[in-house]
């Protein structure tokens, strides 16, 4: 299975050998016939979940390992920009900092974002890469047309060091063809074109399609990247989605027939408004609250365009409860000091390098209510933060933050 060069590297005693052996063993377990070269990686393993992750990264550093391809970093457990106060206590705080430092020493780019495609990491269509972080994986496969499986912690950095990945799954063209049609042609066009619809549709898609490859049919118009980002993130949260197609929109789906490789689908899911209403209701766990305690947006991280929209909706008004706006440091830099100060004066708390669902930033509240426009936040926040969740559009989130009470402008009324 391994080439002579790969066997030679694996036979060593340094960090590169350790990485190559990990990748080779993963390939054996997955039944991959060989390893393939990769052009880049996105590393999810730098988020602190326990001391073992830090010690693993430091072991690679001690062995002199360095990434052999471009490798960007997903969120860590600390906001190194100093925007937000992280309530992580010692010794976990020091271990998290050591982990983030180790990955930088390995040669990874300190992007610290779950949306590397917004920070300029955009591999070409057909390129093999090894990406971690579920929303980044699904965006990379679906919107960019590059090829990656869902690489988990430790294997992601091993692939980046080895410059190789197992040849299986979504790296192979025959496994990227759609077998399920997710037909939204029966939905009102004004709903499908609204920004709040995409997390709802994504969460429904994930539950209905699971780990199959699906194609969305009957979509009018051309959604922008923020809409596709929201759809893919929600789909990857509720289902094991690594790739979706949208007929006439995404690069491997010039039309429905192309996405299906001119074969009959195994299943056609005809989405109706009742299914949408049920999916929408599942995004909220708070039962008719008369107040909210916080708003959290930016999962995946806010783009520059989304931050502009937030500024316009807030309009300089003072918030009754904080809006935690999670974004990448590349977007934060583009914001500039004046705009940042103006936002923060209203009560917006900017969060960079991390997010409120993966590390403790929001106050610990036993009966807290969090409002969000993110399908991914809605899925993970109850378990990760203890807050119950209320889902709404961005405009509804802002109006609710201004008043401190749920405000509906039409999307959920």
Image (cartoon, rainbow, N blue to C red):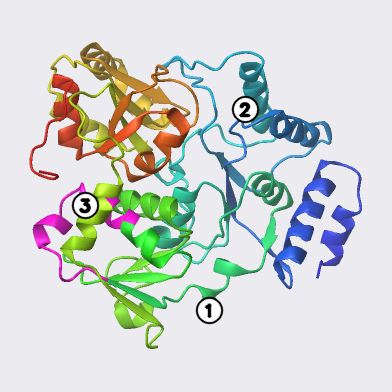
Residue 143, how many percent across, how many down? 38, 59
In the visual, does 59 lie left or right of 227?
right
| Residue positioned most to the bottom | 263
Up-down relation of residue 222 to residue 108 (above or below): below
Q: Residues within 10 Å of mark 2 (few under 14, many from 20)?
A: many
* Range of residues picked out in magenta: 183-203
Query: Residue at horizontal 78%, vertical 60%?
Result: 24
Give the mark nearer the N terminus: 1 vs 2: 2
Residue 310, how many percent across, how many down? 21, 30
Contact (CB < 8 A) between labels 3 and 1? Answer: no
Q: Quadrant of the N terminus?
A: bottom right
Give the mark nearer the N terminus: 3 vs 2: 2
Name the residue carrying label 1. 174
Name the residue carrying label 2. 100
Nearest to the eye among marks 3 and 1: give it.
3
In the visual, does 321 lie left or right of 241?
left
Query: Residue at horizontal 55%, vertical 60%?
Result: 148
């Amino acid at each position: 299975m391994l080439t002579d060069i790969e066997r030679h590297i694996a036979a060593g005693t340094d960090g590169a050998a350790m990485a190559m052996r990990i990748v080779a063993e993963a390939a054996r377990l997955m039944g991959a016939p060989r390893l393939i070269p990769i052009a880049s990686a996105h590393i999810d393993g730098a988020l602190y979940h326990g001391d073992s992750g830090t010690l693993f990264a430091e072991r690679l550093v001690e062995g002199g390992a360095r990434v052999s391809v471009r490798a960007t970093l997903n969120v860590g457990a600390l906001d190194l920009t100093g925007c937000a106060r992280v309530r992580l206590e010692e010794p976990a705080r020091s271990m998290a900092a050591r982990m983030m430092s180790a990955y930088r020493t390995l040669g990874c780019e300190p992007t610290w974002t779950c949306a590397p495609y917004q920070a300029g990491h955009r591999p070409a269509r057909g390129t093999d890469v090894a990406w971690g972080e579920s929303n980044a994986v699904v965006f990379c496969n679906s919107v960019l047309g590059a090829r990656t499986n869902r690489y988990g912690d430790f294997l992601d950095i091993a692939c980046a060091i080895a410059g190789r990945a197992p040849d299986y799954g979504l790296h192979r063209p025959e496994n990227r063809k759609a077998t399920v049609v997710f037909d939204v042609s029966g939905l009102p066009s004004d709903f499908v074109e609204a920004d709040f619809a995409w997390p709802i549709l994504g969460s429904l898609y994930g539950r209905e399609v699971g780990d199959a490859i699906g194609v969305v049919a009957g979509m009018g118009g051309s959604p922008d990247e923020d809409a596709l980002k929201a759809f893919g993130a929600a789909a990857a949260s509720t289902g094991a989605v690594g790739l979706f197609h949208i007929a006439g929109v995404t690069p491997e789906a010039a039309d429905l027939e192309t996405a299906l490789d001119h074969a009959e689908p195994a299943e056609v899911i005809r989405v109706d408004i009742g299914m949408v209403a049920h999916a929408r209701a599942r995004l909220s766990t708070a039962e008719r609250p008369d107040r909210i305690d916080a708003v959290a947006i930016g999962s995946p991280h806010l783009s520059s365009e989304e931050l502009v929209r937030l500024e316009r909706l807030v309009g300089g008004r003072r918030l009754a409860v904080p809006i935690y706006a999670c974004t990448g440091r590349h977007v934060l830099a583009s914001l500039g000091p004046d705009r940042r100060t103006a936002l923060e004066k209203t009560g917006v708390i900017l969060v960079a390098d991390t997010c409120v669902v993966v590390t403790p930033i929001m106050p610990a509240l036993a009966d807290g209510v969090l409002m969000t426009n993110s399908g991914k936040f809605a899925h993970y926040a109850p378990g990760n933060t203890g807050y119950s969740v209320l889902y709404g559009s961005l405009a509804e989130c802002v109006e609710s933050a201004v008043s401190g009470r749920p405000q509906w402008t039409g999307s959920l009324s």
